[in-house]
Image (tube, helix red, strand yellow):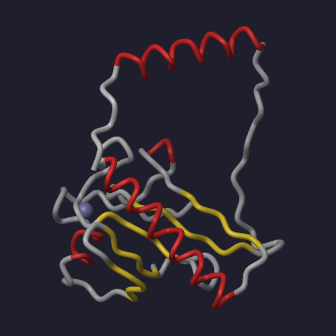
């Protein structure tokens, strides 16, 4: 994963400065809630980042409307990437927290065109717990979902 980590305060982070036009950016698309741009850290031609315009650090900090808007912009950008670069594969990556490999603490999603042997890797060590353990986890999550208020309709 990239070594660059932006530890700026909210409102001063590199993506907030980009949204404010304070630093130059190769902007691809923007609307009321999102901005899509190319980053110098791109791993394949056509790699685009989609960020919320408002500063929010992680998935848990964006509104349901912002979360939906980022995915809609990512899909629009993916269609454009497919039309221009025609990659055989495409990966969406959205990281939260230092341990989740987030490096800029302003919510964003990577739209990454993929090619065979492009060197991008995410190790995935399967643990294969017992079915009863999975049922226990699922029951805990159902309980948490039932006790939380539904997301407000936008
Ligand atoms: Zn920010």
**Residue 111 falls in which quadrant of the image?**
bottom right
Closest to the observer: 56 or 3? 56
Judge whether 151 appears above or below 27 on screen. Answer: above
Judge whether 18 appears above or below 9 on screen. Answer: below
Q: In the rendered picture of this protein, how many numbered marks are placed on residues?
A: 0
Judge whether 56 appears above or below 118 on screen. Answer: above
**Residue 132 falls in which quadrant of the image?**
top right
Residue 73, image x, y percentages? 44, 70
Answer left or right for 118 relative to 46. right
Q: Residue at x 73, y 42 (%)?
A: 124
Q: Residue at x 52, y 66 (%)?
A: 110
Judge whether 149 appears above or below 123 on screen. Answer: above
**Residue occupying the far right of the picture:** 116
Answer left or right for 46 relative to 41. right
- Image quadrant of ligand 1 equals bottom left
Residue 29, image x, y percentages? 39, 82
Q: Residue at x 76, y 73 (%)?
A: 118
Residue 63, image x, y percentages? 29, 48
**Residue 80 falls in which quadrant of the image?**
bottom right
Q: Residue at x 54, y 69 (%)?
A: 75
Residue 1, image x, y percentages? 58, 59
């Amino acid at each position: 994963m990239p070594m660059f980590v932006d530890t700026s305060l909210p409102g001063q982070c590199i993506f907030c400065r980009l949204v404010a036009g304070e630093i130059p950016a190769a902007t691809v698309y923007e609307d009321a809630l999102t901005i899509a741009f190319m980053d110098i850290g791109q791993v394949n031609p056509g790699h685009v980042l989609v960020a919320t315009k408002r500063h929010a650090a992680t998935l848990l900090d964006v509104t349901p409307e912002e979360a939906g808007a980022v995915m809609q912009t990512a899909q629009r950008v993916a269609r454009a990437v497919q039309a221009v670069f025609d990659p055989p594969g495409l990966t969406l990556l959205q990281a939260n927290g230092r341990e989740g490999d987030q490096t800029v603490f302003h919510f964003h999603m990577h739209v990454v065109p993929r090619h065979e042997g492009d060197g991008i890797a995410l190790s995935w060590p399967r643990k294969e717990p017992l079915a009863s353990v999975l049922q226990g986890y699922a029951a805990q999550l159902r309980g948490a979902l039932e006790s939380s208020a539904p997301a407000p309709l936008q």
